Image: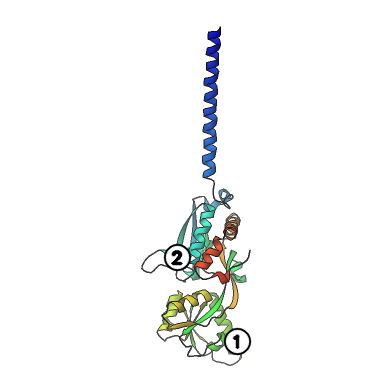
Amino acid sequence: MRCRRRLQLTSIVVVAAAVLVLLAACGGGEEKAAGNTPASGATSVAKVPELQDGVLQVGSDISYAPIEFYEEGTQNAQGLDVDLANALAEVLGVKVDFINTGFDGIIPALNASRFDVLMSAMTVTDERSKEIDFIPYLSAGTDILVANGNPKNIKGIEDLSGLTVGVQIATIQVDQLKAANDTLKAANKPQINVLTFDQNPLAVEQLRSGRADAVIADSPVVANDARLSSGKLQALGLTIEAAPYGIGVRKNSPELKTAVEGALSTLRSNGKYDEILAKWGLQGGALKP
């Protein structure tokens, strides 16, 4: 009987050991799962239809340095919006795919589901907000780029009367120039000769060549164009009608909007938002939560 007891005891020990191994295995699985938990702020991603493929598709007109532009001689997108989109995607636990899209057709392209969101230095306006929703992320205004020394003595939009001005199509600056021309016409003053271009660099080239007297664009872009001109151009340093840039989201994508808002909140909390703005010298445009 003692012998049988020993066998029983041995059996119990073997069974207990097996149970411990199983428990340890279960515990290890839980640890591994915890290690693969999506980054903070990504808890609702499973409920976002647009992110089920693991990619955040971003529509952008990649020709508006320093907000978004291609590294010279490459197809590598860079800039504030690029860095911010990558940081948002990291929080959401997905990758980013930038889709270069002309600015004048970027809202229709978003609404046609050619990409998930748009990030393209787009100023939030009442008119645009009727078509899509926005998540504000940076404040910027309008500035004027002129030849070095400001030979035409331009101090504001009203001083563009009778001059030729380059501007990118579909931007808020086109509306500002139209409003200025309406005012000038009512006052019987010479109107502004407005030259519109598909991309801002084409407008700047008109100024460089002397075929335009000024270029009007967002203040960060004007400052960057002046910096890269080797002293040939200068920014007036204006911030006309400051307003926020917004990440554009379709009105029928509420889950995506909530997820991106949460990710942006995370970037504000962990300091990454401020870090990205500082990298591009745009910390003055930071928006408080």
Which residue sits at x=52%, y=28%?
Answer: 21
Residue lying furthest right: 289
Residue 240: give x, y in percent of width and height: 58, 79
- Residue 203: quarter of image: bottom left
Whether residue 107 is visible, yes or no, is no
Name the spot of residue 123 as percent of width and height, x first: 57, 71
Q: Quadrant of the C terminus?
A: bottom right
Locate residue 133, reporting x and y percent.
60, 63
- Number of labelled discs? 2
- Location of residue 265 with respect to 30 vertically, above or below: below
- Percent from the top left, x then y, of residue 91? 54, 54
Residue type, numbered disc 1: Thr
Please tell me how crowded label 2 is: few (under 14), some (14-19), or many (20+) other residues with Cα within 10 Å.
some
Which amino acid, mark 2?
Gln
Q: Quadrant of residue 207?
A: bottom left
The extreme bottom residue here reads 188
Of all residues, the one furthest to the left in this rendering is: 73
Q: Residue at x 60, y 71 (%)?
A: 125
Q: Tell me where residue 176 sits by quadrant.
A: bottom right
Residue 78 is tagged as 2
Q: Secondary structure at mark 2?
A: strand
